[in-house]
Image: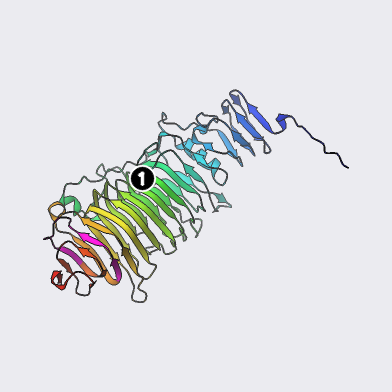
Amino acid sequence: MKKLLAIFLPLSVFATDVTRDTTITGTWNLHGKVLNVYGKISGTATITNAIINANVYTQIFDTTIILTNCRAREFSALWYGAGPVNKDNAKALQLSVDACVNQMDLFIPRGNYKFSKPILIYHLSDNRYIGARINIYGEADMFFDGTTLTYTGLSASAIGFQYAKGGSFHNIKLQGQFVPPSNKGAAYYNLAYNQFNDVTKRCAAAYNGIAIDYDGTLNSGGTTGLMIHDVWITGFDVLVSISPNGKTYNADVLSFTNIRLGNGRCGIQSGQAQEKGNTINNVVAWDNLHTLITIGNAGKYQGGNYIINGGNVAGSCIRLFNINERGWFSMYVNGLYAESFGQIGTILTGDGLYNPPLSFNNCNFDFAYPSQAGLQILLYSNSNFIRFSNCMLRYYGEPADTLHFSGNATFDNCSFSGPVKSGAATEFINYPSAGALHKK
């Protein structure tokens, strides 16, 4: 019988300890060892093939240290010196992202981190974008600003994902510098989209909170499977912009869950036909926002496939939707509650060859009173393939006010607070009685 031999190797074979502040140069290859860091590593150098272990609340690397092919159970942005006391964390945050893409998760502890330049998530090979995956997370949610990233820049996008494949961005508040017009009643609710600008006149056009596939110069493909959840985004012209470059495809199977959309001109904007299988779950908007969601009016000016499930809109949203599907793909809205807003908005579908259905199911819309918002056309629509089922549309508590709709749509088993004025081809099924209808 063969004997089993127990072999004991010294700890140094498996781990290397940095117990005090240390300066290094050149390339330090750890060959897969654990690097226990208790001091700060400085110098102009590259650390490669290390498994990093350190306190997540201390700085352990100077910004001149580059990490390649390193791993950690949880990489902390504080390791590169990011912190609430800094005037600008752009370099520390970007270095942290670069170290973590396709390697490990990035944790940003509680605090308010100012940064002046866009943080870009991408991976290049032979001057081409290849799949970039990262999980970036903090200690905030849609109601709690525990981890806040405050973008002090006034142009471009605060956070940019390019050709992301999987990964996530969550539990973070993202704050920009866009200041919306204040709600002053009817004058506010009648502002056109191009009039809803930063009142400080500092923010440039295309000032985005999160941009997904911002660059169209190196690839035709784009992001797939990115999850954005439990975030609060406020203070941008467009809070989330999808495929703004107008060239790339994909941006599909995206998931937005527990999203709070704050002050801005537009909440979520998209515009190309490859955006299939995208979901928006539990969207909240309680601040000054012109348009909650626009699809097909930017980028390639095409309509993707979106499913919107639930949410609460209240306060000072002028319109919910600006949708132009043409003959592209269907959109579905389920269980959305909205109050004190101006209009459902403009919803168009069909191109003469295809008529994608667009449905609203089990939604409750309580419009701002005419005494608050002025006389509003509550819906601009063009097709009976736009269908509202089991929805309530009303001036809550004002049964004498007429609800004005323009164009064609289908209302099936819907409830209205008062008389309805609509296009001649609008179809009402089951409700209301003919006496309550005033068609053009």
Q: Of residues 260 and 43, which is closer to you in this image?
A: 260
Question: What's the residue at 49%, 47% (across, down)?
Answer: 121
Using the rendered image of the protein, determine whether residue 205 is visible from the camera's viewpoint: no
x and y percentages locating residue 440 in the rendered image: 15, 72
Estimate how packed mark 1 is, as few (under 14), some (14 to 19) or many (20 or more) residues with alpha carbons within 10 Å.
many
Q: Of residues 288 and 335, which is closer to you in this image?
A: 335
Using the rendered image of the protein, determine whether residue 379 is visible from the camera's viewpoint: yes
x and y percentages locating residue 99 in the rendered image: 55, 40
- Residue indicated by mark 1: 233
x and y percentages locating residue 247 in the rendered image: 44, 60
Q: Which residues are magenta?
A: 385-405
Q: The residue under label 1 is which amino acid type?
A: Ile
Question: What's the residue at 48%, 57% (across, down)?
Answer: 222
Say above or below: 376 vs 233: below
Please tell me whether residue 186 belongs to the stretch shown in magenta.
no
x and y percentages locating residue 152 in the rendered image: 36, 38
Please tell me whether residue 399 belongs to the stretch shown in magenta.
yes
Say which quadrant the N terminus sits in. Answer: top right
Say above or below: 185 vs 39: below
Left or right of residue 21: residue 118: left
Q: Of residues 249 and 381, which is closer to you in this image?
A: 381
Question: What's the residue at 61%, 24% (across, down)?
Answer: 19
- Indicate the quadrant where residue 61 lies: top right
